[in-house]
Amino acid sequence: MTLQRATTALIFSLCLVGTPAHAQFGFFKSALEKGHDAYAKEDYAGALKHWTKAASKDDAEAQFRLGRLYDRGEGMDEDPATALIWYTKAAEQGVEEAQTNLGVLYDTGRGTDENNRVAARWFSEAAKQGNRVAQYNLAVMLDRGDGIKANKPQAAALYRKAAEQGLDIALLPHAKILDQLNKPVAAYNKYLQAAEAGAVEAKYIVGLKLQLGLGVTADPEAGTTWIKKAADDNYLPAVLHYGVSLLKGEGGLEADPEAAIATIEQAAETGYIPAIMDLAMIHDTGNGVEQDRTKALGYFEVAAKLGNPVAMNAVGERLLMGVGIESDPSAAMEFFVAAVRAKNPMAMYNMGQIYEAGLGSEPNLEEAVKMYRAATELGSAQARERLIKACQNQTFAACFRR
């Protein structure tokens, strides 16, 4: 339903000599229209007064406008519970904006208990009327299975409808669903549309698809151009990718290690862990730069402090073996323990070896088996091999766990 302003007016036709009728009498204005006038002047108290009067007489638009005043807290404290009451009245009369906002309140649990099914019902009602925001919101719920059963094809259709009405934020998720539905050409075209509308992630994905020839004829140089656009917008995966391309001389770029390191450092300085880890590995292996394992250890330590379990294990290994630093088994154990707590299978394997060999303490085969078992359950093939060997002629509980 498109909101309609009441246009009924009592137009007085009396005419006084020399004085226009509208100057003497003007036009009649309804409470709804008086509320509009007050709201336009930011007289929220006046808008509240007039819209309350109109809403109490079942004026659907006034009910919606009143609900929005309470929802936004315009001229008052936010009151989503009262907003819910008025939105419901307007929604039941078919006001699509009220139906959409009511769905948001139920989806977020503002003014009521969170109820995604009710939210989806109201989004659906508004979406049927062509409300693009409701179409997008319902698409998100169907896409993610958020409180309702996931339905990718329906989500794709709704994203498309919202995008066709100018809601550009629907373009990127629509493209992703098309990818998931194995429609690579349609997906690429939608990513391109999203990229041209300014979606930074879409610029990066268009670049990747052009480089790999996914849904489009491969064109590595054109792909690099799009990745550079995303990097210029400070999209960190693109910044890192462009830096690595500079390091390797890929995508039509000449190898430039100095510029590559500077570019990757740009991403790392924001705390972007993949960039920090790449810098660690670059310096650890001497890939395009002079090998510097002390510098590599520094990057691993930064990533470890940011909570990366792979980095925690890497620091533990280097401290244990004295790579880039003096050997310090005690400090190494602290990093291994932190990585084990973070469910890193390599750290579990390493801890198993430490317990089995008795590094820094007496050998403890039972604890070693526990570590090997835990790593095996996370998919470590080398831990499984050690587990089998360690369990020969043993009766530890971890040896018999399936």
Image: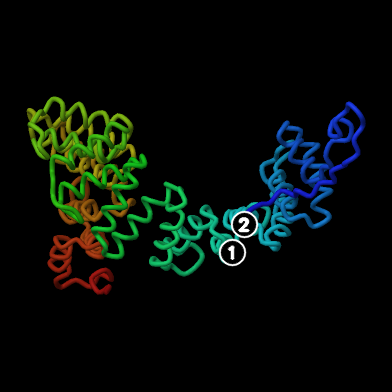
- Frontmost residue, 336 versus 149: 149
Residue at image point 33% right, 55% down: 175
- Frontmost residue, 120 versus 58: 58
Residue 87 location in percent, x, y?
69, 55
Does 15 appear above or below 55?
A: above
Residue 189 location in percent, x, y?
28, 52
Residue at image point 77% right, 43% down: 33
Q: Secondary structure at mark 1?
A: helix
Give the image quarter of residue 84: bottom right
Question: Tag 1: Cα neighbours inside 10 Å, few (<14), some, or many (≥20)?
Answer: many
Give the image quarter of residue 377: bottom left
Residue 5 location in percent, x, y?
71, 48
Give the image quarter of residue 200: top left
Give the CA separation, mark 1 to mark 2.
7 Å
In the rendering, which numbered label is found on residue 272? none
Residue 300, visible in the rendered structure: no
Question: Tag 2: Cα neighbours inside 10 Å, few (<14), some, or many (≥20)?
Answer: many
Q: Do the CB atoms of the residues marked 1 and 2 lie less than 8 Å apart?
A: yes
The type of residue carrying mark 2 is Glu
Residue located beneath label 2 in the image: 96
- Frontmost residue, 291 versus 170: 170
Residue at image point 33% right, 31% down: 270
Residue at image point 13% right, 33% down: 246
Q: Is residue 78 left or right of residue 184?
A: right
The type of residue carrying mark 1 is Glu
Residue located beneath label 1 in the image: 125
| Residue farthest to the front, as pictured | 17
Residue 284 location in percent, x, y?
12, 35
Q: Is residue 98 left or right of residue 214?
A: right
Q: Quadrant of the C terminus?
A: bottom left
The scheme the figure's colours follow is rainbow
Q: Secondary structure at mark 2?
A: helix
